[in-house]
Image (spheres, rainbow, N blue to C red):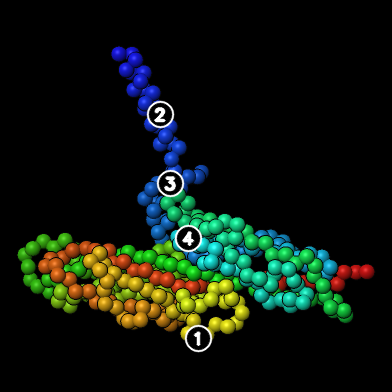
Amino acid sequence: MKKGLILSLLLVSILLFVISCGPQPNAGDQPLDTAAAVLAASTGIQGVETNLLPNYPPNLLYDQNELIAIVEVNNKGNFNLEPQDCFVEITGFDPAIIGGNFRSPQSCAVNLGTLEGKNLYNVEGMSNQLEYMSSRVTLPSGVYEYEPRLNILTCYRYETRANPSVCIDPAFYQVTSEQKSCRPENVLMSNGQGGPVGVSYVGVNMVGSKAVFEINIKNFGPGRVLTTNSDIRSCGQDDLQYSDLDKVEYRVRTTSGNVNCRPSDGFVRLSNGQGKIICNYETRASSAFETPLQIELAYNYIDSFSKTIKIIETPE
């Protein structure tokens, strides 16, 4: 009897140890419960955010010295970035004065492989640091100071997925004594879906057995939307065309397949940061039901900030 009890206690201890060694959702000083972590990971209006570390670069430096800038990159959304998906470029300076790798874009995921977005186990997302160095800053003869405004550009590819639950009722206008499971209503989604571009609301209307969805796409972030055909590695080179701006690639489907949407080319253009997709879905059901409307958005995004530095001639 004692041996059986001891064996049972030993097995329970081993089981608890194994469970404790597994991944825990959002561990930290004040861990979230699973439901809160899922909500935090699946909502939000942030994408990639960048900033300069304090004093890198300094506000003032002498020429003939090295210049170092360290850019911190944070993936605040929920889309993972591979090395080819995101680049940071510094512009606004004379390459004859500031050299080194200041002249070249760097991948946001350098030395990482993948810059992961937020998820159930890390609701803050991953970060990385990029170093730009010019081993020597040289002012031309007779120039005693130089004050460039460094422009830090971040260009990246991102995707947003929204899955609002919508009610489809083919008998919406018919008088019936049947207890309906749902009623077609508009769906507000103002909290975003984990990216700078997302769905702000879905309007739902019934025309007989056809559901009509009015999907509003919004640029929630501070940057500019670029088409997926644009070159994110060189978006700081002033070679963007009007056709590259404000276009979001989209796909809409239900669990039973694709729906018929306009614009028909699969791209929606934003005006004043917003655009509309109109979709029709013909159902064969005879009664009301709820289903997830699966909306996928793909786009490139450009954001920037600046810092002015002063370079003065080294006293002899």
Query: Above or below — where is 259 with respect to 32?
Result: below
The N terminus - image quarter: top left
Question: Which comes before the other along the chain, label 4 or label 1?
Answer: 4
Bin the neighbour count of mark 3 within 10 Å (Cα to Cα): few under 14, some 14-19, many 20 and up.
Answer: some
Q: Earlier in the sequence, mark 4 or mark 3?
A: 3
| Cα–Cα span, label 4 and label 2 | 35 Å
Residue occupying the far bottom of the picture:
242
Q: CA distance from mark 1 to mark 3?
A: 44 Å
Residue position for label 2 = 14
Residue 209 sits in which quadrant?
bottom left
Disc 1 residue type?
Tyr
Q: Quadrant of the C terminus?
A: bottom right
Residue 191 in the image: above or below residue 241: above
Report x, y in % for residue 86.
54, 67
Residue position for label 3: 25
Disc 4 residue type? Asn
Q: SS at mark 2? A: helix
Question: Which mark is first along the chain, 1 or 2?
Answer: 2
Residues marked 4 and 1 touching at CB (< 8 Å):
no
Q: Estimate the x, y position of residue 238 in percent, counting from the top left.
A: 60, 82
Marks 4 and 1, how far apart at CA: 28 Å
- Provide residue 302's location: percent of width, then percent of height: 54, 73
Front residue of 132/218: it is 132
Q: Separation of disc 3 and disc 2 at Cα?
A: 21 Å
- Whether residue 299 is visible to the viewer of this picture, yes or no, is yes
Count the marks: 4
Closest to the observer: 252 or 287? 252
- Lower position in the chain sequence, tag 3 or tag 2: 2
From the image, state whether disc 3 or disc 2 is nearer to you.
2
Give the residue drawn at x 70%, y 68%.
Answer: 101
Q: Is residue 203 above or below residue 243?
A: above
